[in-house]
Amino acid sequence: MGNGEIRVRRGGNAGIGRLTAVCLTVSCLLCGCALKGVETGPADGESVPAETALGTEAHTETEAETEPEAETEAEPSHGGVLIGENQELLTKEQMEAVFAYMDRFYEAMGSLEMKELSDLFAESAAGQTAFHRNAWEYMIGLRSMQETDLRLDEYFYRLWIIEAETLEDGSVDVDMGEQSFLRFAQTPDMVSEYPGYWHDFVLTEENGRWVIREHMQWEGAFWNMRKGYRDTDLEELSDAEQIFADRRDLLLRQAADDLERRRALKEAGGADSADAEEQKPAHSYDRSAAVAYARQYMDERNEDWHDYSGEGGNCQNYVSQCILAGGIPMDVEGSARWKWFSAAQNDSASETGCTLSWINVDSFWAYARDNTGSGLVAEVDADFDSGQAGDLIVMGTPDDWNHVVIITEVVKDAEGNTVDYLICSNTTDVRDFPVSAYPSPRRALIRILGWN
């Protein structure tokens, strides 16, 4: 896959397989803005490459693993494992409630068919049930409308307990981290990785079994679905089902509208194609170097740079570093500037501080669009299917760009048509993840052409 392209397979789900991995650095995982970071991860060692993370049997036991198992042949299975030093903070029965939720979620995403989930939640948690049902349905609907097969052939997740507290009513509030490895049907030879989600479960005992009273997962679909109600007790909403159904439908309409917008843009040849033709960059862009940097620092942070994960998100800072690694120099000339010399914001032409364009998605979009003379040469809102490894995709809602990622592979069908991209990103830390499966309803391509 050195040429930055892979061919997709269309067709049926090959079944849920067996994966294993060890946890990497855990980062704040909000799509587009960082809210809460996880400071500690599992204590059982270093990571293995994603490509070697498949082929060992998944366990749904609360046993810590210290070494990856050797590859073995077995019937396809699915599931996860609890790892780390804090396993004694939950009972086996409490962990079974968590595993039941996790397995049901990945089964739904694997088949892109909704699963029943009311049995996973407490009888008093109607608002939570409505919220999760509609969040799942949004993710399924969004992935189903894409032009490629986003079902899962395989998945595996590892959980670790960060902290747990028994509340006065006997319920248990537990913060957990998750690392997941996914193999999508469209790209069966590629493993997509989330190195660290953050979950907050409140578990309660009801009718002799443990169920979920509250849950929040710091992932874009859940965050987008809960807009306007992020600090609200969902059980206080008498019309929670209608609220979240309306939100689901709005996001799906936005996603469908954006697909049509991109198709129309393709027919027109891109929004700024004429301007891009007039700008012949003097120097080329080293796409391989940019992608290598992206993969190296997807789940960790380069200590030479400030980390903005807890200050609104590190995504733009990360892709700015990536294209710098690809040879695009900082630019302090003219009215459009792009630089980082320190974390202190400074939009002047001096070689001090940093411009907002280095760390903010909207501001970088404006810089890439408006810059002339020296520095970056780019095409903003280009034909979405014209991207190459090293190009950028911005995401968000119709009124707000709030996330940016870098393309690591171009996914093509048997006829050579681009049907998807695999990407890496920070803030939502992912490696080689299909951009079509991302939860943002709007996206656009920035083609990096070179520099002057």
Image (cartoon, grey):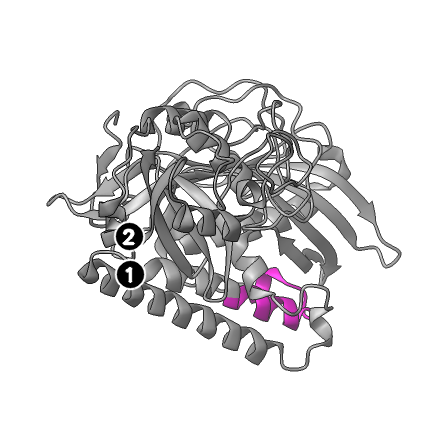
In the depicted view, which residue is nearer to us: 315 or 419?
315
Residue extending farthest to the left is 415
Image height check: is 330 above or below 197? above
In the depicted view, which residue is nearer to us: 29 or 319?
319
Give the quarter of the image for residue 1: top left
> What's the magenta bit mostly, secondary-structure-wise?
helix
Answer few, some or many: residues within 10 Å of disc 1's Cα (few below 14, many 20 plus, some between 14 and 19).
many
The amino acid sitting under disc 2 is Phe
Label 2 residue SS: helix
Residue at the spot 54% in from the left edge and 18% down from the top edge: 67
Confirm whether the magenta stretch covers residue 126.
yes
**In the displayed structure image, the side of residue 118 where residue 88 appears, left or right:** right
Q: x, y percentage for residue 426?
A: 53, 39
Q: Earlier in the sequence, mark 1 or mark 2?
A: 1
Q: x, y percentage for residue 345?
A: 66, 41
Residue 107 is at least partly visible in this image: no
Q: Which residue is mark 1?
A: 262
Count of labels shown?
2
Image height check: is 209 above or below 41? below
Confirm whether the magenta stretch covers residue 120.
yes
Residue at the spot 39% in from the left edge and 26% down from the top edge: 327
Q: Which residue is mark 2?
A: 384
CA–CA distance in space, label 1 to label 2: 6 Å
Q: Are marks 1 and 2 in contact (CB under 8 Å)?
A: yes
Q: What span is colored magenta in the figure? A: 118-134
The amino acid sitting under disc 1 is Arg
Residue extending farthest to the right is 168
Q: x, y percentage for residue 292?
A: 40, 24
In the depicted view, which residue is nearer to us: 159 or 394?
394
**In the displayed structure image, the side of residue 9 where residue 315 appears, left or right:** right
Image height check: is 399 above or below 77? below
In the depicted view, which residue is nearer to us: 95 or 22?
22
